[in-house]
Image (tube, rainbow, N blue to C red):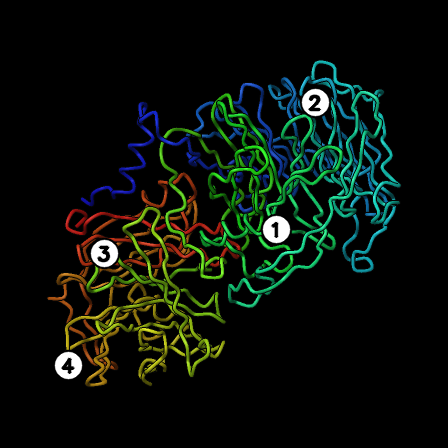
Amino acid sequence: MPRPSALFAMTAALAASVSLPAHADMMFNRIASFAVADNLPADIDGNTETSSEIIAASEDGTMLAYSDSPLGAVGFVDITDPRTPKAGGIVRIDGEPTSVTIVGGKVLAGVNTSKSYTEPSGNLAVIDIASKAIESSCDLGGQPDSVAVSKDGNFLAVAIENERDEDLNDGEIPQLPAGDLKIFTLTDGVPDCATMKTVVMTGLAEIAGDDPEPEFVAFNDAGEIAVTLQENNHVAIVDAATGSIVSHFSAGSVSLDKVDTKKDGAIAFTGKVDNAPREPDAVKWLDNDRIVIANEGDYKGGTRGFSIFSKTGQMLFDSGTAYEYEAAKVGHFPDARAGKKGIEPEGLETGRFGDDSLFFVTAERASLIAVYKDAGAEPQFLQLLPSGVAPEGLVAIPSRNLLVTANEADLAEDGGARSHVMIYERADGPASYPMITSGLTDDGTPLGWGALSGLAADPEEAGKLYAVSDSFYKNSPAIFTIDTTQTPALITARTVVTRDGAPAQKLDLEGIAADGKGGFWLASEGRTDKLTPHAILHVDAKGAIRDEIGFPDELMANEIRFGLEGITTVGEGDDMMLVMAVQREWRDDPKGQVKLLAYTPKAKEWSAVRYPLEKAETGWMGLSEITAHDGKLYIVERDNLIGQAARVKRVYAVSLDGFKPEKLGGELPVVAKALVHDLMDDLKATGGYVVDKVEGFAIDKNGDAYAVTDNDGVDDSSGETLFLRLGNISAIN
């Protein structure tokens, strides 16, 4: 029976430990994930779109409530045991819940009921947590966005955005009616509708001052409300008791150098952003005198980071490119969506954990949360946390050392990840993520990477690996050098694959093997409908293509889209043979069998065997990688399923003694396989959902085995790259 991997054993030990050394750093690690779809009642199709957007916690920190806009509901999650969150059910609402907060035993939810952009409307719903019943509501007279309750529980603030129609006149503002701020008095957590005050916010901003669009609200301990007017690039401070505006100021603009501004299939920090308005989304108070804003941008701007202001408008700190660079170092830069907004900081939370005042910044497009310590003039960056797809809301529960995030994207329609609520615990010990990262280049910019597919070991140096990126980076195919002697593993170099001196086009690199002479053999998965050929490439140490070997006619006559997914070498000298895994059945393959191709460069001869796949209950089954080591071919076999649907993510072995490939066109022998290691526990060890693409596997000179997942370049993906240290192959065989 396969043994648990080193990663899984380490994670389990950390979870069980109660007395780690006192000098160990306090770090957050994800301990559980809850798929929002698990809250769907039995009478609703399980594939129905759901979303967790804004999230709140009960006063004792054991119950979560989140807004689910597409479903038209408020959902609940029981985290009495945070490691095993349980479905708490939903409350259907007539309208679109936009935000929630909890006071006592009540959820207060802003609900959008607008008929159109020009006829905005909404209400404030009061939901009893125990009975899951809507007890009352207050008419808001407009479309609500954010809601917040004062620290003493006496007041509730609601930002009435009356958002613009982005399709009308290219989204230009003003677009009336104008938004405003509503303030309610609370009695035992329940708003008195008759106490609603309207704070007019027109005439404040230089940008479309007659059309304020309040986005987010937050209270300090003094009962003051910070309000962001996102499209207007403005911030206002309002006294809750009187409804008077204490101060207001522009959020200002930022110019950035050395940023990636192009969606071009290459990560290149060579662009500029000039005088971009910050356009803050979320705002939180760091104390009674300072606020932090997340500069998402939505109209004309966005500056890829966050800023700290005094409540009188003095700019105290701006993060510049720092947050974005940290995201790129861990492979979370979203090239396909970056453009002017970059990683898109959006959500914020603050919390005092022990002696540390912390704040948390979500990056929607990077699917990350950054953790900072409020350390005076300049905040101290502590760590990055992996999240689900598109983190939006988050709530800190310091009394339980917990942080919770709500991730709004639901990709069920495309077979992707569902919306998830994710739970993190702060404790002594190391951070489990990232597992692999990179440093900075000579010009101080990140060594951009992502979408790692094939993995190979250096033939001479233990702990040294190589990886390739797939077709996601179509204009920058690359070979990455990885130092695994460090934790996390460190990408130390990126070598661009070139043809005639320029980055090679029409490649989909899925496999890599060292040639023993400083160069590499690469496998490119073809797709003729996109003019990408099926090919083997031989490149030198500088990445220059020296030879390209196309598929023979016997193969091409039966091709489909899913081609090579790994390459390895067997033998030496004139007898050296390249062995490649084909991902799925081609037209001449029996159902449930795929080819392992063999090619001898000296003789220029092709041959093959067939490999028996596991049966797929749903989706499809295929191969992702192949590695030769000590008389065996190690093969990664997986389904294309994600999360709770995933079943097969495994490493099998085929003995080279039984590997007798025959010429193409005739009967091909079927090899026998043996299970080496089931990767499911490894993929669950960081508390997230199971990702679908285990794409790389390698065994180094010392026999240590590694696997890596493909993060799809953070495109419709959480962006997580799991770099798995599986232990010595002799121990897991």
In this rendering, which labeled residue sits more in front, label 4 or label 3? 4
Query: Which numbered disc flags the more N-terminal residue, 4 or 2?
Result: 2
The kind of residue tagged 3 is Tyr
Residue 553 versus residue 20 in the image, above or below: below
Quadrant of the rendered image containing residue 23: top left
Residue type of the residue flagged with mark 2: Ser
Which x, y percent locates residue 304? 61, 51
Q: Position of residue 401 (x, y in %)?
A: 47, 26
Q: Which residue is the site of mark 3?
A: 652
The tag earlier along the polypeptide, 3 or 2, is 2
Between marks 3 and 2, how big is the CA–CA gap? 58 Å
Mark 1 neighbour class, 10 Å CA radius: few under 14, some 14 to 19, many 20 or more: many
Disc 1 element: loop
Residue 37 relative to residue 731: left or right: right
- Kind of residue indicated by mark 1: Arg
Q: Which numbered disc, 1 or 4, marks the residue closer to the eye?
A: 1
Disc nearest the viewer among 3 and 2: 2
Circle on res. 304:
1
Mark 2 vs 1, N-terminal side? 2
- Answer yes or no: is residue 107 visible: yes
**Which marked residue is nearer to the observer: mark 2 or mark 1?**
1
Q: Is residue 190 above or below residue 111?
A: above
At mark 3, the secondary structure is: strand
Tell me residue 550's x, y (percent).
Answer: 34, 82
- Please report the residue visible at 32 percent of the width from the left and 36 percent of the height from the top: 11
Of badges 1 and 3, the one in the foreground is 1
Q: CA distance from mark 4 to mark 2?
A: 77 Å
Which kind of residue does numbered mark 4 sit on? Asp
